[in-house]
Image (spheres, rainbow, N blue to C red):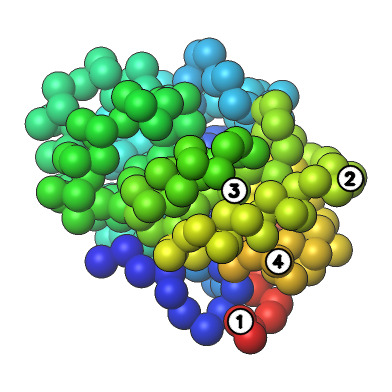
């Protein structure tokens, strides 16, 4: 059961499946769990990633060149679970790869590989009913992305949210940001007001200071580009068996920068 209601602030990291190699993704997942991750998003690499900035686009390119696809990404999630990862795993995928699979086959794969949540960033609310219904039947949390919008629409999105609400801190693509627009703070408070599930903030979280700021007004953070960039920096050491262990420890220490810092008051 996907349940992130606990006494800690959420730390939800994102990595791209198969970057730099599938087996290393499993080790990265274990490092993130050791660093205090509440759940883990694994991104399915895609050729036309509308929501992704250059860092994750490069990671997707590397993973695709290594033969990664949606089926292998789901199976990679299952391998993580079989190798000691016990936190919830969320599949982050664009809608087109889902459409390329039969719905029954897609959900059978999710079930067989113990995937806990699904996030489809380019699927509009108005077109998500069938997928949400199937997720509910399979006891898979359908994670909703929410950006600044009208109160009525915000109420609908938060009412339908499962697992947690992914609150977008900045319009545009993912990527490291130094500062956030002041309006984002009132927006997050409004989402919290409407949501019955935890509210986590993502898109641009890249420092401990930003984590502290967002934890004051939300239930936690999603960290993607900063971690994927660290994987990119460590790629040479990660793919070398002789230096891999040290690189994984360095990655884990870096991930702790974003770890759960405060208790919910």
Dot 1 corresponds to which residue? 264
Quadrant showing the C terminus: bottom right
Q: Which mark is residue 178?
A: 2
Evaluate if marks 2 and 1 touch, with contact meaning CB atoms under 8 Å apart. no
Q: Residue at x 19, y 55 (%)?
A: 139
Secondary structure found at label 4: helix
Answer left or right for 209 relative to 104. Answer: right
Which quadrant of the view contains residue 262? bottom right
Which quadrant of the view contains residue 203? top right
Front-most of residues 109 and 132: 132
**How far apart, in angstroms, are the residues tagged by discs 3 and 4?**
12 Å
Residue 112: percent from left, percent from top: 16, 48
Front-most of residues 148 and 136: 148
Dot 3 corresponds to which residue? 167
Residue 71: percent from left, percent from top: 28, 30
Front-most of residues 150 and 78: 150
Answer left or right for 177 relative to 222. Answer: right
Answer left or right for 7 relative to 214. Answer: left
Earlier in the chain: of badge 1 and badge 4, it is 4
**How far apart, in angstroms, are the residues tagged by discs 2 and 4?**
18 Å
Evaluate if marks 1 and 4 touch, with contact meaning CB atoms under 8 Å apart. no
Dot 4 corresponds to which residue? 217
Secondary structure found at label 3: strand
Secondary structure found at label 1: loop
Residue 139 appearing in the image: yes
Circle 3 residues within 10 Å: few <14, some 14–19, many ≥20: many
Front-most of residues 44 and 216: 216
Q: Residue at x 31, y 31 (%)?
A: 128
Earlier in the chain: of badge 2 and badge 3, it is 3
Secondary structure found at label 2: loop
Earlier in the chain: of badge 2 and badge 4, it is 2
Residue 144 appearing in the image: no
């Amino acid at each position: 059961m996907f349940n992130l209601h606990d006494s800690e602030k959420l730390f939800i990291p994102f990595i791209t499946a198969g970057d730099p190699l599938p087996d290393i993704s499993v080790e990265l997942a274990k490092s993130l769990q050791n660093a205090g991750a509440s759940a883990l998003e694994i991104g399915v690499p895609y050729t036309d990633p509308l929501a992704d900035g250059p860092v994750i686009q490069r990671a997707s390119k590397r993973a695709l060149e290594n033969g990664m696809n949606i089926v292998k990404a789901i199976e990679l999630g299952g391998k993580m679970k079989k190798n000691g990862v016990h936190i919830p795993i969320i599949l982050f995928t664009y809608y087109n790869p889902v459409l390329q699979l039969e719905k029954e086959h897609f959900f059978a794969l999710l079930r067989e590989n113990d995937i806990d949540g699904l996030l489809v960033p380019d699927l509009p609310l108005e077109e998500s009913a069938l997928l949400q219904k199937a997720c509910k039947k399979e006891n898979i949390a359908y994670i909703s992305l929410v950006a600044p919008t009208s109160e009525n629409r915000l109420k609908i999105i938060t009412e339908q949210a499962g697992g947690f609400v992914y609150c977008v801190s900045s319009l545009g693509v993912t990527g490291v940001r130094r500062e956030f627009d002041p309006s984002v703070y009132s927006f997050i408070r409004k989402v919290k007001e409407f949501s019955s599930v935890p509210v986590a903030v993502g898109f641009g979280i890249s420092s401990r200071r930003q984590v502290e700021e967002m934890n004051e007004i939300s239930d936690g953070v999603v960290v993607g580009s900063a971690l994927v960039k660290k994987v990119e920096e460590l790629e040479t050491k990660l793919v070398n068996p002789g230096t891999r262990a040290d690189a994984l420890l360095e990655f884990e220490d870096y991930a702790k920068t974003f770890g759960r810092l405060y208790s919910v008051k």
